[in-house]
Image: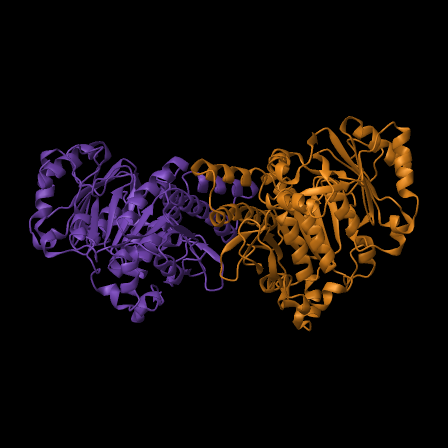
Chain colours: A purple, B orange
Amino acid sequence: MVGPWTRRAAAKATCTSRARQVPFYGIFSTLPARAHTPPRTGIAKSRAVLLEHAPFDMALIVQKYGGTSVGNPERIKNVARRVAEHRNRGDQVVVVVSAMSGVTDNLIKLAKEITPLPSEREMDMLLATGEQQTIALTAIALQQLGIPATSLTGAQAGIVTDGVHTKAKIRNITPKKVHAQLDAGNVVIVAGFQGETAEGQITTLGRGGSDLTAIALAAAVKADLCQIYTDVDGVYTADPRIVPGAKKLPEIAYDEMLELAGAGAKVMQLRSVEFAKKFGVVFEVRSSLNDNPGTIVKEETQSMEGIVVRGVALDKNQAKVTLVAVPDKPGVAARVFKALADATIGVDMIVQNISHGSKSPTTDISFTADKPDLAKARKVMDALKAEIGFAELAVSETIGKLSIVGVGMKSHSGVAAKMFETLAKEGVNIDMISTSEIKISVVIDLAKGDAAMRAVHKAFLGT
Amino acid sequence: MVGPWTRRAAAKATCTSRARQVPFYGIFSTLPARAHTPPRTGIAKSRAVLLEHAPFDMALIVQKYGGTSVGNPERIKNVARRVAEHRNRGDQVVVVVSAMSGVTDNLIKLAKEITPLPSEREMDMLLATGEQQTIALTAIALQQLGIPATSLTGAQAGIVTDGVHTKAKIRNITPKKVHAQLDAGNVVIVAGFQGETAEGQITTLGRGGSDLTAIALAAAVKADLCQIYTDVDGVYTADPRIVPGAKKLPEIAYDEMLELAGAGAKVMQLRSVEFAKKFGVVFEVRSSLNDNPGTIVKEETQSMEGIVVRGVALDKNQAKVTLVAVPDKPGVAARVFKALADATIGVDMIVQNISHGSKSPTTDISFTADKPDLAKARKVMDALKAEIGFAELAVSETIGKLSIVGVGMKSHSGVAAKMFETLAKEGVNIDMISTSEIKISVVIDLAKGDAAMRAVHKAFLGT
C-alpha cells in the first residue's frame, strides 16, 4: 500500500485505543477521553489551514450525504467526485449516505399495501435495504474513479443500538471494520439510519437518523472533520424566502442550533445536534451542490457572546388553545397537561395569567401545540370540561410563533424590550410570551408573521 | 405460547444436536448422520398420509417461492395465505423467498449506469437487498393473517459461504436462529440467494441461488418436506408447448433431473439438484398458482427402473463446430479442447470418427457448444489452425439436440435402436450421437426438431 494515507496509518499504529468500544448511551462514566476534549486538528480550520501543516495534516473526515444528494446514479457519481477530491489530497474519508430519495417512501408504500400497521421489526428489515443499496452504488462510483472503496452496513460498521425498532438509540459503536478498511487505504461508505442490536436484529434510527450516524461515527473514529452535506448552503439568520436580507452564519453554538430547530427552523433533527453537543462533535452543515463553506456547529465560545441574536425563526405550524376561566385551584394545570401528555400531544408554549376575583378566582390557561394535533387536543380538553369546570375552549390556528435566538442574550439586557418595541412599531400585537436563557418567543397573528420577522431581523441583524 | 406446534417443540427439547453446525462443503467427513439417511417422516407421503399419524406428525416444511410468486404485494399475500394453511395445520414452516421479480434487474441497471463493470463485492451488497425486502414484506403479510412470523437475512439464518462474490458456495449452515424462532412458534422467512462469509462479508449464490438456499436449509434443519414453488406445475415428460401429450411426472430421480436439465429442459439449476442429491434432500417442484401436487425429486428406487424413458428434451440453443480433416496424431484433441476450456467455452457433445487413409491419416472432430459462445469458439479454432493443420472449419447453428433420459435404460436393451428407428421413420437424419448410462442424445436438423421430439415421445411414452 503506497500513498500519503499510509503515513497516517503508520502514525496511528501506536494509538491502540482507536478500535475500542465507545459507549454513547447509558454508561456515561466510561466515556473515552476524546468526548470532552476538542478535536485533534480542529474542525473550524479550513482545508487551506490544514494543508499548511502538510504532510502530517491529512485529515480523517466523516461526510454525510442525504437522499437528494444521492437521488440517482448521476448524483451518486457527483458525490463520488467530491469524495475523491478529498481522498486524492491524502485524507481518509468515511462517507455516510441515506437511501436514494423516494426509495424509502416506496418501500413504506409496498408494506402499507399489505397492511396499514406493519410490524416495526419488519419495517426496519425492509427500510434498512434503502441505505444498503446506496452504499453499494456509492462504492461502485468511487471505484469507477479509481478510488479504493468499501461499503459497510450499519451493523458491519459496528453501530450497536437498543431494540426499539424504527426509532432505536445508538448504544455504542465498535468501529473495528471502519478502521481496518481506512488503514487499508479504502474510502469507507457506511449506511446511515441503521444499526443492529447486540442480538443481531436490524434496527433503524428514525427521522434524521443518517445525520446521527455521521455524528456518532465522527465521535467514535475521532474524526478531524464532520460534514453534513445537504441541499441548503448552511444555517441562515432567518429563512431567506421570508427575509431576503438573511445571511449565512459562519458558525453557531449547539444551543443556538437547538433553540432554532425547536423554534421551527428546519435544518437538522434536534437529536443529532443534542448528540453532537453531548460528545463535543464539531460539524459543518454545507451544500452538496456547490463548494461554498457552510456553517460550523460547535460549543459556544466567548467570542460568540458578542452577537446578541444569532437567528430569527417563525413557526407557522402551531395552533393556540385557551381554557377560559379555569377555577384557580391546585392541581388543575397538572390535570390538563397530564391528559395532553397521555394522548402524546406535544405542548410547546404554556402561559397562565394571574387569577382574578377573590371569592372563586379563575384564570386563563393557554398553550400551543402542532396544528395536526389540534383536533386531538380539543377532544382531550372537551373530555375534561366537566371535571375541571372551565367556561370555554378558545382555539386559534391563525398564529405564528416568532423567536429570536442567541447565546449573547445571556450577557446583554434589554433584548426582550427591543423585540417588543420593534413589534409594536409594526403594529403587531403580542398574544403570548415565553423565554429561555438564549431565546425569546412570542405568539402573534399569523397574517403579520412575515412582516414581523423581517422587522425583528432588521432590528437585531441589520438587514 | 399455545398451539399444536408446542408439542413438537417439547419433543425437540431432547434433540440437542439440532442446532449444531452442518458442514456442506469441503469437510465431508463430518457430515451429519441425516445427510445419508432418508427423511424422518418421508417427503413422498402426501399431507393426507401425514395427518393419519396426527398429532405427532406435524411436519417441518421448507418452502421456496420464486420472484414471480412474490412479484407484488397481492402475490405476497397469496404466498402468506398458502404458508398460513400449513401453519394452521400445526406444521412448522421455513419460507425461502427470492427478490420480487424485476427488483434485481432494476438494481443491476442502476449499477450499470455508473459503470459497466461494477465490483462483485458491491454487487452482492446491492443485490442482497432484493431478497431482504421480500422477507420483510412476507413476514408482514403473515402477521396480518395473525400468524407469528420473523424474517431472517441469509447471514442471520446462519448461511456461511466462501468469499467468491456473485457465485459463492455454501460452506456450512448454523441454523441456530432458525430453530430458535421455530421453537418460539414463528414461521421463519429466510432471504434466498445470499449468505455471508466467516468474516461477515455479504455474498450471493448466483443463478438459482434461492433454490439452493431452500435445499441446503432443508438439509440443515432436517426438514420433513422441501417444496420448490414455481410457475410450472412440476416436471413434465417433455415441454408441453412442443409435445401436447406431455404428462406431469409424479416422481423423478436426481440423476434423471440432472440429465434432463443438462439436456436443455429448464426446470432448476443443476447445482441445486446436485446439492440435493449429495445430501439426500427429497424435494417437490410444484406450482404456486394452484394446489396440484407437483413432482417429487429423490434418489432412484427399484420401481423407477420399470420406466425406460422418464422424459424427452430438445435443446435448441446449441451450435455444432466441425474440424474437417484433422491430422490424426496424438495430442491433437487435447490441444483443441484445452484451448476451448482456457477460453471458458463449455463444450457439450464431442464426436470423433475413425481415421481414413494409411499414409497421413486424417479425422473429423465435431463438438457442440452454446450458441452465444460460437463466435468465441470460432476465434479460438482459427488461432489453432496453423498449429494443428486441419483443412476446414464447418459451423452449423441450425441444429437441435434431442435427448431421452431414464434410469430404466440401465436395465433395458434396445433403447437406442428404438430411438434411431423412430427418427428414421420420421425421415430425420442423425448428425451426432452421444450416450451416458441413463441418456441418449442425438444432434439433428433444427427444422425437424419439434416433429422428431413428438415422434420419440410417442414411441417411448405413448402420447
Percent x, y for residue B215? 68, 54
Quadrant including the N terminus of chain A: bottom left
Residue A192 in sight in this render: no
In the rendered image, the vertical position of residue A216 relative to residue B454, given as above or below: below
Return the residue nearer the eye: B315 or B279: B315
At x 20%, y 61%, the residue is A38
Percent x, y for residue B179? 62, 63
Quadrant including the C terminus of chain A: top left
Most extreme residue toward the front is B359
**Is B49 placed left or right of A12 in the picture?**
right
Percent x, y for residue A439? 17, 49
**For residue B351, which quarter of the picture?**
top right
Numbered marks: total: 0
Return the residue nearer the eye: A311 or A385: A311
Return the residue nearer the eye: B109 or A333: B109
At x 27%, y 61%, the residue is A279
**Is B136 placed left or right of B304 in the picture?**
left
Percent x, y for residue A312? 18, 42
Return the residue nearer the eye: B99 or B141: B99
Residue B451 in sight in this render: yes
